[in-house]
C-alpha cells in the first residue's frame, strides 16, 4: 500500500498545489513518484528474499474482503511504473507535455492518477478491484491524450470508445467467473477452477477476459487506437502510454492466465496460447513494416510500439519459462527504451519545432549528448548487443527453439532487421546528412534536465543489458517457473 497511497494522495495534493502555483504541482508529482519508487524497490527486495506480502483492505479477510498482494511479479512491475513515472515528471513540462504550466490545469494530477491506476492493477488480488483500477488509469489517460489539440481530442475519443469495449468484455468475463465460482479473489478462484475446467461458461469467460485485456494492451489486431493516441498526444503522455500504460494489459494477461486459470487452460478448450503467439507475430511484422513507412517521428515510434508489444504477446503465448522470461524482460526493456525515445522526440520538438524525420539533418552535431542517448536506445530497439533489447529477444528465440517453433525464431530475428531499417534511416539523417534547415542549424542541446533524463535512460539500457543475468536469475526465472511449474 505504501506504493499506492503516495500516488493517490499526491494526485489530490497536486490539484490544490496547482491552484496556488503551477510549478508546485510538478514538485508534488516528483516527490510522490520518488516516494513510490523507493517503496517499490524496498518491496521488490523484500518479496524476493522473504516471499509475498498480503494486505487486507479494511481488515476484511479474503475471499470476502479485497486483498492487495505484493509478490515478485507485482513488485517488478511496480518498480517499472514508478521509475518511468518519476523520469516523466522530472522532465521539463514544455518538452514533455508541449505546454507551459498554467494555474488550474490538472496536468500532474492526471499523471499521478494514471500511475495510481497502474499501480493498483499490479497490486490487486481481486478481479473486480483490478477492473476498478483499469478504469481509473483509462479515464486519466483520456484526459492526457486530449491535451494534444484537436487531433488529440479525436484520438482520445477513439480510445474512449475502444477502451470501453475492452473494459466491458473484461467485466463480463469476470461476471461469468463469479457466477461459476462465487468468488472474485484470484487465489480463491484459482483453487476452484480446476474442478469446472470443462465448463462452457468458464471457457467463455476466459475468451472475454483475454480479448478485453488484449485490447487494453493494444495487441494486434486490436491495436487500432494506439497509433493516433501515441502520435497526437504530448511526448510525455506518449512515453507513459508506451512505457507502462499498455503493459497493464500484458500484466493482467500473465496474472490471470497463469495464476488464476493455470497453464492447462492455455492449451485446452480454447487455443489461447496459439492465438496470442500468432497474433503477436503478426503484430511484430505489421508494426515494423508500418513504422518503416512513417516520416513523423512520433508516429514511427507509435507503430514501433505495436511491434514491440507483439514480442510480449509471443512470450506469453509460448508459455514456457524461457519465453515468459523474455516477455517479462521485454516489459522492462521496452519501458526504458521507448520512454527515452519519446522524451527525446519531445526535446527535439520543443527545441526546433521539427517532427518530420527528413528534416532532422545535422541534429547529431547540434545536440550530440541527446542524440547519443537516442542512438543507444535505438540500437537497443533493434536488438544490438550488449544493449537490453538484445537479451529479451534472445530469450524469446531460445524459448521458441526449445519448443521447436522455428517460425517464431525466424520472425523475431527477421523483425530485428526491419527495426534496423527504420532506425538506420533516422541515424543517417541525424548523424551523416548535412544540415539543410535553418531551425536545425540554430538548434542547441536541450536543457540539463532533458539531457540528464535521457542519459539516465540510455545508461539503464546498457546496465540492464550487461546485468540481465542477475535480473533473470534472481527475479524473472523464479516467477516464470512458479507460474508454469
Image (tube, rainbow, N blue to C red):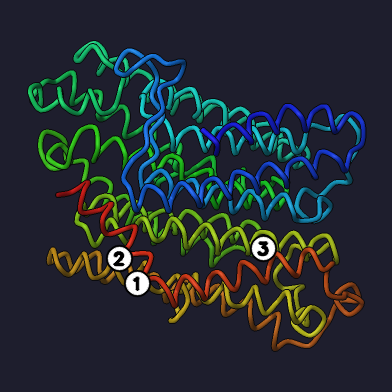
**Residue closer to the observer: 108 or 13:** 13
Q: Residue at x 67, y 29 (%)?
A: 9
Q: Is 133 situated left or right of 188 in this image?
A: right
* Position of residue 41 in the picture relative to residue 45 (left or right): right
Secondary structure state at the residue bearing disc 1: helix
The residue that mark 3 highlights is 297
Q: Residue at x 10, y 38 (%)?
A: 268
The residue under label 2 is 473
Q: Quadrant of residue 107?
A: top right
Disc 3 is placed on an element classified as: helix
Measured in 3D between alpha carbons, the distance from the residue under mark 2 to the one under mark 1, in whole angstroms, is 6 Å
Q: Would you call the spot at circle 1 few (<14 residues within 10 Å), some (14-19), or many (20 or more)?
A: some
Q: For the residues carrying marks 3 and 2, which lies nearer the camera in this image?
A: 2
Q: Residue at x 49, y 69 (%)?
A: 381
Q: Secondary structure at mark 2?
A: helix
In this view, the residue in front, 258 or 218, is 258
Residue 43 location in percent, x, y?
46, 46
- 177 in relation to 349, above or below: above
Residue appearing at x 84%, y 52% in the figure: 94
In the image, is 198 to the left or to the right of 366?
left
Nearer to us of marks 3 and 1 is 1
Front one among 56 and 19 = 56
Describe residue 117's horizontal placement relative to residue 74 as left or right: right
**Label 2 environment density (alpha carbons within 10 Å; few <14, some 14–19, many ≥20):** few
How crowded is the residue under tag 3: few (<14 C-alpha within 10 Å), some, or many (20+)?
many
How many dots with numbers?
A: 3
Q: Contact, CB < 8 Å: mark 2 with mark 1?
A: yes
Q: Position of residue 356 (x, y in %)?
A: 73, 65
Q: Which residue is mark 1?
A: 469
Q: Quadrant of residue 172?
A: top left
- How far is the residue under mark 3 from the one under mark 2? 36 Å
Amino acid at each position: 500500500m505504501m506504493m499506492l497511497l503516495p500516488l493517490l494522495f499526491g494526485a489530490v495534493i497536486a490539484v490544490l498545489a496547482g491552484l496556488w502555483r503551477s510549478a508546485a504541482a510538478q514538485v508534488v508529482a516528483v516527490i510522490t513518484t520518488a516516494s513510490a519508487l523507493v517503496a517499490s524497490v524496498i518491496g521488490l527486495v523484500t518479496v524476493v528474499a522473504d516471499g509475498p506480502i498480503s494486505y487486507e483492505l479494511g481488515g476484511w479477510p479474503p475471499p470476502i474482503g479485497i486483498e492487495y498482494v505484493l509478490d515478485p511479479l507485482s513488485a517488478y512491475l511496480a518498480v517499472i511504473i514508478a521509475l518511468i513515472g518519476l523520469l516523466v515528471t522530472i522532465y521539463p513540462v514544455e518538452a514533455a507535455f508541449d505546454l507551459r504550466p498554467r494555474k488550474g490545469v490538472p496536468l500532474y494530477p492526471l499523471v499521478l492518477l494514471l500511475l495510481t491506476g497502474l499501480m493498483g492493477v499490479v497490486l490487486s488480488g481481486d478481479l473486480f478491484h483490478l477492473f476498478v483500477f483499469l478504469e481509473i488509469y483509462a479515464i486519466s489517460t483520456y484526459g492526457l491524450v486530449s491535451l494534444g489539440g484537436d487531433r488529440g481530442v479525436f484520438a482520445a475519443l477513439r480510445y474512449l470508445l475502444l477502451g470501453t469495449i475492452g473494459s466491458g468484455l473484461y467485466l463480463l468475463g469476470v461476471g461469468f467467473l463469479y457466477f461459476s465460482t462465487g468468488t472474485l479473489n484470484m487465489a480463491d478462484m484459482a483453487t476452484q477452477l480446476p474442478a469446472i475446467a470443462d465448463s462452457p461458461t468458464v471457457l467463455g469467460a476466459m475468451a472475454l477476459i483475454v480479448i478485453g485485456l488484449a485490447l487494453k494492451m493494444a495487441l494486434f489486431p486490436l491495436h487500432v487506437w494506439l497509433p493516433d493516441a501515441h502520435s497526437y498526444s504530448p511526448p510525455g503522455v506518449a512515453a507513459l502510454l508506451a512505457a507502462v500504460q499498455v503493459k497493464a494489459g500484458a500484466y493482467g494477461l500473465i496474472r490471470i492466465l497463469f495464476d488464476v486459470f493455470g497453464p492447462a487452460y492455455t492449451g485446452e478448450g480454447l487455443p489461447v496460447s496459439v492465438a496470442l503467439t500468432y497474433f503477436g507475430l503478426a503484430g511484430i511484422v505489421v508494426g515494423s513494416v508500418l513504422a518503416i513507412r512513417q516520416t513523423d517521428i512520433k508516429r514511427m515510434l507509435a507503430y514501433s510500439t505495436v511491434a514491440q508489444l507483439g514480442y510480449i504477446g509471443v512470450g506469453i503465448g509460448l508459455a514456457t519459462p524461457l519465453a515468459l522470461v523474455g516477455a517479462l524482460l521485454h516489459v522492462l526493456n521496452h519501458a526504458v527504451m521507448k520512454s527515452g525515445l519519446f522524451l527525446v522526440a519531445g526535446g527535439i520538438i520543443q527545441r526546433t519545432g521539427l517532427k518530420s524525420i527528413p528534416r532532422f539533418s545535422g541534429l547529431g552535431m547540434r545536440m550530440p549528448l541527446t542524440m547519443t542517448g537516442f542512438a543507444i536506445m535505438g540500437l537497443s530497439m533493434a536488438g544490438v548487443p550488449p544493449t537490453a533489447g538484445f537479451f529479451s529477444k534472445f530469450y524469446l528465440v531460445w524459448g521458441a527453439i526449445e519448443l521447436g517453433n522455428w517460425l517464431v525464431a525466424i520472425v523475431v530475428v527477421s523483425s530485428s532487421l526491419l527495426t534496423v531499417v527504420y532506425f538506420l534511416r533516422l541515424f543517417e539523417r541525424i548523424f551523416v546528412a548535412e544540415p539543410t534547415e535553418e531551425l536545425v542549424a540554430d538548434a542547441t542541446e536541450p536543457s540539463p534536465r532533458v539531457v540528464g533524463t535521457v542519459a539516465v535512460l540510455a545508461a539503464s539500457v546498457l546496465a540492464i543489458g550487461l546485468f540481465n543475468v542477475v535480473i533473470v536469475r534472481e527475479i524473472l526465472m523464479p516467477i516464470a517457473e512458479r507460474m508454469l511449474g
